[in-house]
Image: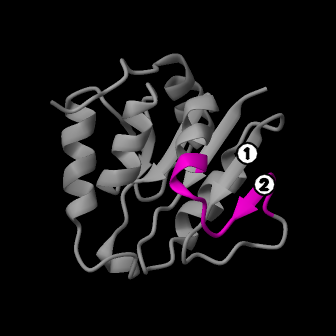
Amino acid sequence: MRRVLVTLGSERFPFSRAVRVVARSLPPDAEVVWQLGHTQAPSDLPGTVHQWLPFDDMRSAAENADVVITHCGVGSTLMALRAGKCPVVFPRRSKFSEHVDDHQEELAGALAASGLAIVAGSNPKNVRDLITRAAAQNAVPFSPG
């Protein structure tokens, strides 16, 4: 069984696109914890669903997960890296009204180029493979200087 944390951070913009793609792509035996923030949960979302999680609970969920899937916000990405995970990141896109600009795509590119994250594109075809890859590619726990 894969333990998966999906976190969309605290952005004031909904991120339904990522929820739909991830929900369709989860392994059937996945044990999932969702933190959705300002995104409304579909009624059939599998796993344990939270709009918000206290920071300590989020950190614990990241440490206990096999895979962390996150928007490409700095705080969420650093949390995953500090937990020793190679996150699967979904950058929010301004053209879908998920953010005001595309800075998350820029960050995702830099993280991928450094081998620190796996980037799911704007229309990922096989996120399940990315989840498997991320579970096998845990990062060295990251701690900024």
Mark number, residue 81: none
Name the residue that disc number 1 marks. 32
Residue bounds of the magenta highlight: 45-57
User: Residue 126: percent from the left, percent from the top?
Assistant: 57, 41
CB-based contact (under 8 Å), mark 2 and mark 1: yes
Is the N terminus in the top left, top right, bottom left or bottom right quadrant? top right
Q: Residue at x 43, y 80 (%)?
A: 12
Horizontal placement of 106 versus 121: left or right? left
50 is within the stretch colored magenta: yes
Q: Secondary structure at mark 2?
A: strand
User: Residue 71: percent from the left, percent from the top?
Assistant: 43, 56
Horizontal placement of 57 versus 41: left or right? left
The kind of residue on which mark 1 rests is Val
The kind of residue on which mark 2 rests is Thr
Mark number, residue 48: 2
Is the C terminus in the top left, top right, bottom left or bottom right quadrant? top left
Q: Is residue 10 above or below residue 74?
A: below
Q: Secondary structure at mark 1?
A: strand
- The quadrant holding residue 61 is top right
Q: Earlier in the sequence, mark 2 or mark 1?
A: 1
Horizontal placement of 138 versus 128: left or right? left
User: Residue 19: percent from the left, percent from the top?
Assistant: 61, 62
